Amino acid sequence: MTEVRPGIVKAVIPAAGLGTRFLPATKATPKEMLPVVDKPAIQYVVEEAVAAGLEDVLLVTGRNKRALEDHFDRNYELEHALSRKGDDQRLSLVRESADLAAVHYVRQGDPRGLGHAVLSAASHVGDQPFAVLLGDDLIDPRDPLLARMIEVQQERGGSVVALMEVAEEQIHLYGCAAVEATAEDDVVRVTDLVEKPARGEAPSSYAVIGRYVLEPQVFDVLARTAPGRGGEIQLTDALQELAKSDAPGGPVHGVLFDGRRYDTGDRGDYLRAIVRLACEREDLGPDFRTWLRDWVREEL
Ligand code: UTP
């Protein structure tokens, strides 16, 4: 008889990083609030969680948290002004983000790393498996990843990370996984993890990207994980422990992802996300594509 595993209903979205790669834009605004076309990056991420069936969302916030809280709250003044003008379309856009999900907040006092941000979610999450979605990592909704990760966690138990093959000269920017094949083409067993490996020391070309489905035992491991690379408490270090031992919370599997993904905390990727998503939009796309084609032909 197959074991019935507890369902996954909660999503944790860390959004408390300093965003130094995007200064000065992120001096007073969280990078997760930077617009991608006309929606802040974090809204795409919350929509992705909801699309995967997770309607309890915990945002881990830091300084400048006001903008995040306001975005997922009602704005009666704006709603009143739009409704007076009869602008129903914009009115529904303004209400949409407030009605998306039950959004909760926890404050990460000091940004001591992603592992520390996840640890601050412990009391909200409780003792069920949960998902983590990085607030600056955009996965194209046409390439659903999280739903597949949840499925793999429900089938196999333990924890699940998302892995993407990257070029050799890029792997030192990511956590990197050593893997073994399984009977399923898109699922591997993770045997080891290294955070931002030095050049030539990566165990594979598989980078860990910003989606995780974790067992709550990860909190016990994080609580005793010492600061690692960059003096930060690294989620990768805690997952390495789960991957290596038979401890509760493991094993760790990886779902291989080859869809469209943008790291909006990186300026180059942020620009690519905007151009691509704007080109594909029904309202903006036709004019923007024409302009872009002419501009590339004439100026580049
Ligand atoms: P990054 O590694 O991109 O960190 O975090 P960062 O410090 O914000 O960015 P840079 O390198 O200075 O530009 C990945 C995700 O984890 C969150 C970030 O907000 C982002 O969504 N994070 C990171 C936290 O919530 N707390 C932390 O202490 C670190």
Image (cartoon, rainbow, N blue to C red):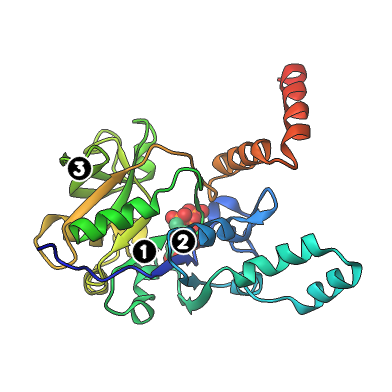
Cα–Cα span, label 2 and label 3 = 27 Å
Which is nearer the eye, 298 or 153?
A: 153
Circle nearer the N terminus (1, 2): 2
Which element is circle 2 on? helix
Q: Residues within 10 Å of mark 3 (few under 14, many from 20)?
A: some
Residue 131, which numbered label?
1
User: Type of residue at label 3?
Assistant: Ala
Query: Residue, x 53% and y 71% (percent of image)?
Result: 101
Residue 181, position in %: x, y? 16, 39
Residue 144, position in %: x, y? 43, 48
Residue 159 seen in the figure: no
Badge 1 vs badge 2, beta-carbon distance below 8 Å = yes
Which is nearer the eye, 109 or 81?
A: 81
Q: Is residue 36 left or right of residue 127?
A: right
Query: Which quarter of the image is occupied by the C terminus?
Result: top right
User: Type of residue at label 2?
Assistant: Ala
User: Type of residue at label 1?
Assistant: Ala
Q: Is mark 3 within 8 Å of ligand 1?
A: no
Quadrant housing residue 227:
bottom left
Cα–Cα span, label 3 and label 1 = 22 Å
Single out the residue that lies furthest toward the right.
85
Query: Residue, x 34% and y 73% (percent of image)?
Result: 119
Cα–Cα span, label 1 and label 2 = 8 Å
* 219 to 297, vertically: above or below: below
Which is more foreground, mark 3 or mark 1?
A: 1
